[in-house]
Structures are given as C-alpha cells and as structure tokens.
Image (cartoon, helix red, strand yellow):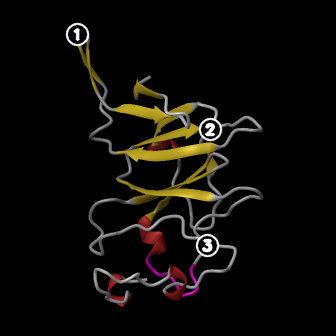
Amino acid sequence: SKVYELPATSRQSKGTPVVNIIQIGPDEKVTSLLMVPKDGKGDKFFIMGTRAGMIKRTEITKYDNIRKTGIIAMGLKDNDELRWVKTSHGKDVVVEVTEKGLAICYNEVQVRAMGRSASGVRGMKLKAEDRVMSMDVIDEDLAIFEESGSKYHGPDMLVVLENGFGKRTMLKH
C-alpha cells in the first residue's frame, strides 16, 4: 500500500489490522515492512533471506507495479519461509548466523541479481537440523576492515544465546 492510503489515527488508537489494508491469505504473514523513496535515490536492491539459507538479490525497481492482490516476491521450497528482507546499495556485506552457532559473511555482489519469482541461491549450506536464525546487511561504508598496528577498526558482531551468554566477534573473522 502507499503511505497516503493508510488511515490516519490518533496516538492512543489501536490502529488497523494489516489484513484490512492489504489482501493476504490466511496462511500468509507479513515478514517485513520497508520504506523505499519514490525518487529512486539510495538503496538499489532487496536482499531476501530464508530460514533454509537461501538468499535472493533483486532490484527494487522490479517491485514498482504491485497489484492489490500482491505479487510473488520469492519462490519458496517446502518447509522454508521468508524471514528477512533488507535493502542494500549494491556493494554491501551480508551476514547470516545459524541456530547452531555458525556464521558467514560475504559481499552481496557474490549473489547475482535475479527476477521477481526466482527462488534465490544458497547463501549458506546448513546441516539437516540447523536453520538460519538471523540475517543482516551491513552498509559498505561500515564494513571496512582496517588494522593499524595492533588496533582493529571495523564492525563487530554480538551474538547473545538463549541462556544469556554472549560473544562479541570482529566481523572480519
């Protein structure tokens, strides 16, 4: 939906259920809400990630003409679900982390741009019982790994486990 089509409400109101704004089936759910500037400046791609480790990179312009009934954004295999949709500039870094503690970090240009209904490519090979727990896109300007002497200047990743333990790791590792 367009922002100007959303009903205006007061600050104290409960709002409007999403199913009253867009047409979604009973077995579908909203994965992500994104704001994309109409002038086309800024981000150029959508990066989509699934629980089974599939990644898809599609130009934002492929989604300009959306019908009220929606369009297929990504073909999914059985027992897989679309969990993350992020925007990117075209040279950003993708990070995926699994439930079993594995992580992968790669440049998004390694994932070719695809059409709307494509299923994507494997972003991370998983063991049978493992699933992707989180995916994020790091801006190319922030993902610069510099070392001067013994000091590291670059982004870190913080992983917090369900029992409260955490680990901070340099993203370059």
Q: CA distance from mark 3 to mark 2?
A: 28 Å
Q: CA distance from mark 3 to mark 1?
A: 50 Å
Does label 2 or label 1 sit earlier along the sequence? Answer: 2
Q: Residue at x 42, y 47 (%)?
A: 137
Amino acid bearing label 1: Gly
Residue, disc 1? 149
Q: Quadrant of the N terminus?
A: bottom left
Neighbor class of circle 1 (other Cα within 10 Å; few <14, some 14-19, many 20+) is few
Q: CA distance from mark 2 to mark 1?
A: 35 Å
Q: Residue at x 43, y 77 (%)?
A: 64
Residue, disc 2? 99
Residue, disc 3? 72
Residue 69 lies in the magenta stretch: yes
Say whether marks 3 and 2 touch (CB < 8 Å): no
Res 14 quadrant in image: bottom left
Neighbor class of circle 2 (other Cα within 10 Å; few <14, some 14-19, many 20+) is few
Foreground disc of the pair 2, 1: 2
Say whether marks 3 and 1 touch (CB < 8 Å): no
Q: Which of these two is toward me, 110 or 106? A: 106
Neighbor class of circle 3 (other Cα within 10 Å; few <14, some 14-19, many 20+) is few
Dot 1 lies on which element? loop
How far across and down, in percent of the image, does residue 95 sit? 48, 39
Does label 3 or label 2 sit earlier along the sequence? Answer: 3
Res 101 quadrant in image: top right
Does label 3 or label 1 sit earlier along the sequence? Answer: 3
Q: Quadrant of the C terminus?
A: top left
Amino acid bearing label 3: Ile
The span shown in magenta is 64-70
Amino acid bearing label 2: Glu
Res 38 quadrant in image: bottom left
Is 3 rendered above or below residue 82? Answer: below
